[in-house]
Amino acid sequence: MVIGQITYTQGQLLALLPSGALHTGGYVNALSQFIAAVLNLTAGAKHASIDTTVSTINSDLAGITFVSGTGTALDPYKLVPISASLQATLEGFGSTLDNYNSAVGMGCNEASGLILGH
């Protein structure tokens, strides 16, 4: 996945998700919600009002690496420090991303499945 013009591997992204080794809370919650939102959009979920949020986060992360490593013993995945202001910006999108990923206000029911185009 390309985020902010930086290509991340599946392993790097999985390490950021809630069950991943790099999920430390704080701004990483917003990063994991962002990854989930992009995957939902790619899978055909409703765009609703999330397009602006995704675009803004992509712009805010332009050229900024937030995770590195190949996941091997010699080169484990690591969070790359980002500025406190960028962390705060990402955290500010947390609720919007969580609501989108939880389909709040979209007329969906939990576990109802994805229906393309709806």
Image (spheres, rainbow, N blue to C red):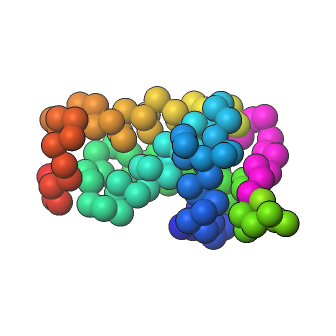
Q: Residue furthest right?
A: 74
Can you tell which quarter of the image residue 22 is in?
top right
- Residue 76 in percent (x, y) is at 78, 59
Task: Assign the N terminus to one quadrant of the image.
Answer: bottom right
Magenta segment boundaries in residue numbering: 77-86
Q: Residue furthest front?
A: 73
**44 lies left or right of 99:** left
- At x 68%, y 35%, the residue is 24
- At x 57%, y 31%, the residue is 92
| 107 falls in the magenta region | no
Give above or below for 19 relative to 78. above
| 78 falls in the magenta region | yes
Give above or below for 87 relative to 17. above
**44 lies left or right of 100:** left
- Tell me if residue 54 can be seen: no
- Tell me if residue 75 can be seen: yes
- Residue 16 in percent (x, y) is at 61, 48
- Residue 38 in percent (x, y) is at 43, 56
- At x 85%, y 66%, the residue is 74
Can you tell which quarter of the image residue 13 is in?
bottom right
Can you tell which quarter of the image residue 19 is in?
top right
- At x 28%, y 31%, the residue is 104
